[in-house]
Image: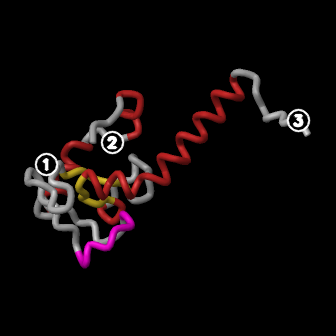
């Protein structure tokens, strides 16, 4: 998945090489074994560049940070994952981030609580 420009500083300067090595080590195949919440019956069958066996969409292999910290590129924190598994793995984290962003925007606008009449 493309890195947003505002997040580029969170990744090491050699991220492209780290990502490439992680995907190559996985044999250019999704290495998810259920971390995404799906029961793959073992390892996900998605192969980079091929149609996803479950969705039919073209697979683009990505690299997920298991602890959601882009600066932590230890091999045990990285998972070569198809976009389906990566997005599912990150879904709860993305929801938390969206909620925090909304809260901050409301607070910046002066709304600190909801006043609900009795």
The chief SS type of the magenta part is loop
Give the structural element (helix, strand or loop) at label 1.
loop
Q: Is residue 107 above or below residue 16?
A: above
| Rendered image: mark on residue 46 | none
**Quick one: label 1, few (<14), some, or many (20+) residues within 10 Å?**
some
Q: Which residues are magenta?
A: 36-42
Left or right of residue 71: residue 52: left
Question: Element at badge 3?
Answer: loop
Mark 3 to mark 1: distance in Å?
Answer: 51 Å
Dots 1, 2 in contact, CB < 8 A: no
Tell me which label, 3 or 1, sits earlier in the chain: 1
Q: Nearer the viewer, mark 3 or mark 1?
A: 3
Q: Looking at the picture, does residue 107 appear above or below residue 92?
A: above
* Quadrant position of residue 37: bottom left
Question: According to the image, label 2 marks what residue?
Answer: 12
Query: Between 38 and 61, which is closer to the camera in this rendering?
Result: 38
Q: Quadrant of the C terminus?
A: top right
Q: Nearer the viewer, residue 12 or 98?
A: 98
Q: Position of residue 17 (x, y in %)?
A: 19, 46
Q: Quadrant of residue 112?
A: top right
List the residue tagged with mark 1: 58
């Amino acid at each position: 998945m493309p890195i947003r420009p505002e997040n580029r500083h969170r990744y090491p300067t050699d991220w492209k090489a780290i990502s490439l090595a992680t995907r190559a080590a996985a044999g250019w195949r999704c290495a998810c074994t259920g971390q995404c919440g799906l029961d793959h019956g073992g390892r996900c069958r998605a192969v980079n560049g091929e149609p996803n066996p479950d969705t039919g969409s073209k697979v683009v292999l990505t690299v997920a940070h298991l602890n959601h910290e882009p600066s932590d590129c230890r091999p045990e924190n990285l998972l070569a994952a198809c976009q389906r598994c990566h997005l599912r793995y990150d879904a709860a984290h993305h929801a938390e981030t969206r909620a925090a962003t909304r809260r901050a925007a409301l607070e910046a606008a002066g709304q600190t609580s909801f006043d609900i009449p009795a």
